[in-house]
Image (cartoon, rainbow, N blue to C red):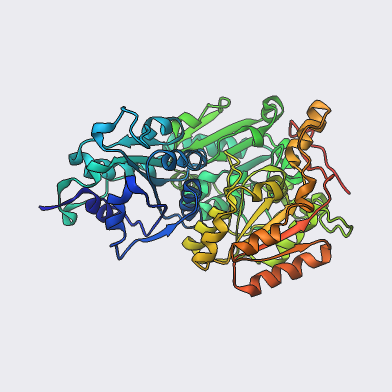
């Protein structure tokens, strides 16, 4: 058993657990840790310009690759800047290890400089938090933290490290270190039999694929089940890309915001929903009386607390999504050939008939046209990020994504400022071209992360849908309350120069006014080899299709 500094042991544990990237900012309260991080041959560190952005990057690293990353920062305001990033990951079930520096243990609770109880602060928004006050507990706590982050419904774990603990001598033998086993629940065979019986007895069943299917690595299994049972496939927003756009069974999204006419129609015509890895949250369901109707629900989720949280399921099954899908497929094959389903056979025709219009030619540019050009310009291998607001909703409605882990939204939190650092982290993880899709107001959140992209030569492209408004808030004020207050931002198309701002961060940049110039601008951005900002000046008065229930979503055509 070797004696070493606790920080050296922590770095060795990170290496043994497969961590290859740490996103963070060094500081006095975490420098014990950084001494050994800098000596690691297996871990690359990326220095950000804001602590929150480091967490977004680490979370997106996992979203794009399925591989865990870590985020690190100093104490006090550095640690509190982590909170929004940790919440963003937690609500989307994204695991990471967040490491914060802290004042020495003797100063805890005594108002020492930059001393704050970050473990307590993050308790409601993290999967688990620790403040390590005993150096002997460093190894067992990190060992447990990796299991907690990965097991069941994944999520972020925060570990707060007082400086004296970082620098303490401890006994640790890396050769004897073992990762903790992870429990992966399987479904009860009787429940699988009930589920297949319910599906076979239904007239218009559908498969609702949630983000948990993607997290479980079960996308192909979901498609196999849909094809075997001839089930229309609706994806939640977090599962966008889990079925290709032209797959015969693709029924799009349903929902009151990022839903699509085809998804809402197929859902409302269904009599049974097989929901796997989904949460039935508000932007997806809208008014629950309409969503539930008289249809039956089978809900499969790895977290027992998710089943029945929003409404009771007719059949709830606690299981890993992959294990459940494999069991359902085996049972379905035993039962024999599924009956043909007219609703499934009509999907390709319906997709064309119900597709929203994007080929607008007028000036100022209609925002929908931006997404048509995004679909044409980057191909299936690009990875997209988007944070919040009306631009995120248009993106979810109109972007065509054909591969899993290629569309990485801030789903449950809707975090402004997520987009650029997430695109950076996704690019580090995947090596692919990444594109951040955002509005003009959101662009000013964490714009400093363009400097990080430039420093590390990561050619993130930022597509700014500049409608000079807090667009989603304007629409809510207009239709829900009948007024408008302080949401107009005409300065974003005049007084404020995003091109100069981007160029100041060593990026390629240009402003576009003509819809026919959007695609050429994207090509010039790609050709530059730099991080790039394309500021697309759009009509400020365009509304986004949405509603309060699946049966009252208002469509706007311009």
Q: Give me the residue at 45% from left, 54% from top.
A: 66
In the foreground, 377 or 57: 57
Compared with 519, 293 (above or below) is: above
Inspect this view and state whether residue 19 appears.
yes
Is 152 on the left-hand or right-hand side of 472?
Answer: left
Residue 388 position, x and y percent, is: 64, 44
Extreme residue toward the left, this view: 1
Q: Give me the residue at 20% from left, 36% from top.
A: 134
Is 420 on the left-hand or right-hand side of 513?
Answer: left
Q: Count of labels shown?
A: 0
Compared with 308, 520 (above or below) is: below
Extreme residue toward the bottom, this view: 527
Residue 348 position, x and y percent, is: 75, 55
Is 246 on the left-hand or right-hand side of 173?
Answer: right
Residue 138 position, x and y percent, is: 23, 43
Inspect this view and state whether residue 404 appears.
no
In the foreground, 388 or 379: 388
Compared with 284, 19 (above or below) is: below
In the foreground, 356 or 340: 356
Q: Give me the residue at 62% from left, 66% from top.
A: 507
Residue 155 position, x and y percent, is: 43, 41
Is 476 on the left-hand or right-hand side of 125?
Answer: right
Q: Give me the residue at 72% from left, 44% from top.
A: 390
Extreme residue toward the front, this view: 113
């Amino acid at each position: 058993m070797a004696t070493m500094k606790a920080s050296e042991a922590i770095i060795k544990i990170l290496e043994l657990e497969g961590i290859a990237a740490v996103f963070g900012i060094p500081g006095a309260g975490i420098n014990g840790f950084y001494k050994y991080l800098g000596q690691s041959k297996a871990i690359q560190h990326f220095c950000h310009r804001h602590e929150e952005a480091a967490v977004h990057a680490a979370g997106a690293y996992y979203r794009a690759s399925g591989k865990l990353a870590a985020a690190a920062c100093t104490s006090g305001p550095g640690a509190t800047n982590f909170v929004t990033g940790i919440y963003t990951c937690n609500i989307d079930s994204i695991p990471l290890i967040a490491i914060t520096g802290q004042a020495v243990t003797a100063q805890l609770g005594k108002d020492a400089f930059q001393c704050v109880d970050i473990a307590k602060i993050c308790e409601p928004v993290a999967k688990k938090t620790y403040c390590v006050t005993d150096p002997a507990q460093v190894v067992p706590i990190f060992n447990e933290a990796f299991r907690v982050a990965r097991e069941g419904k994944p999520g972020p774990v925060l570990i707060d490290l007082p400086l004296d603990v970082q620098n303490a001598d401890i006994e640790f033998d890396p050769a004897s270190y073992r990762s903790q086993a992870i429990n992966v629940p399987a479904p009860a065979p009787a429940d699988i039999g009930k589920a297949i019986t319910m599906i076979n007895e239904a007239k218009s069943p559908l498969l609702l694929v949630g983000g948990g299917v993607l997290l479980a690595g079960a996308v192909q299994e979901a498609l196999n089940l849909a094809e075997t049972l001839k089930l229309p496939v609706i994806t939640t927003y977090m599962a966008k890309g889990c079925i290709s756009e032209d797959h015969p069974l693709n029924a799009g999204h349903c929902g009151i915001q990022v839903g699509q006419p085809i998804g809402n129609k197929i859902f409302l015509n269904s009599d049974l929903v097989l929901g796997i890895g989904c949460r039935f949250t508000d932007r997806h369901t809208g008014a629950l009386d309409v969503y539930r109707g008289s249809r039956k629900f089978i809900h499969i989720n790895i977290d027992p607390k998710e089943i029945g949280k929003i409404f009771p399921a007719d059949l709830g099954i606690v299981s890993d999504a992959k294990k459940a899908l494999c069991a359902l497929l085996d049972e379905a094959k035993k039962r024999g050939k599924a009956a043909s389903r007219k609703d499934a056979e009509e999907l390709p025709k319906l997709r064309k008939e119900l597709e929203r219009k994007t080929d607008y030619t007028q000036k100022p540019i209609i925002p929908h046209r931006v997404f048509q050009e995004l679909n044409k310009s980057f191909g299936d291998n690009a990875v997209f990020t988007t944070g919040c607001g009306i631009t995120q909703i248009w993106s979810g409605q109109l972007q065509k994504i054909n591969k899993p882990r290629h569309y990485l939204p801030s789903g449950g939190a809707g975090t402004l400022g997520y987009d650029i650092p997430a695109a950076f982290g996704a690019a580090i993880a995947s090596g692919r071209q990444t594109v951040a899709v955002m509005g003009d107001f959101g662009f000013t959140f964490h714009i400093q992360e363009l400097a990080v992209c430039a420093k590390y030569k990561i050619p993130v492209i930022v597509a700014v849908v500049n409608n000079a408004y807090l667009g989603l808030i304007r629409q809510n004020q207009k239709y829900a309350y009948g007024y408008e207050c302080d949401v107009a931002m005409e300065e974003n198309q005049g007084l404020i120069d995003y091109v100069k701002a981007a160029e100041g961060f060593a990026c390629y940049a240009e402003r576009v006014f003509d819809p026919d110039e959007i695609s050429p601008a994207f090509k010039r951005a790609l050709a530059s080899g730099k991080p790039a900002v394309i500021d697309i000046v759009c009509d400020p008065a365009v509304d986004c299709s949405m509603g309060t229930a699946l049966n009252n979503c208002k469509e706007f055509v311009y």
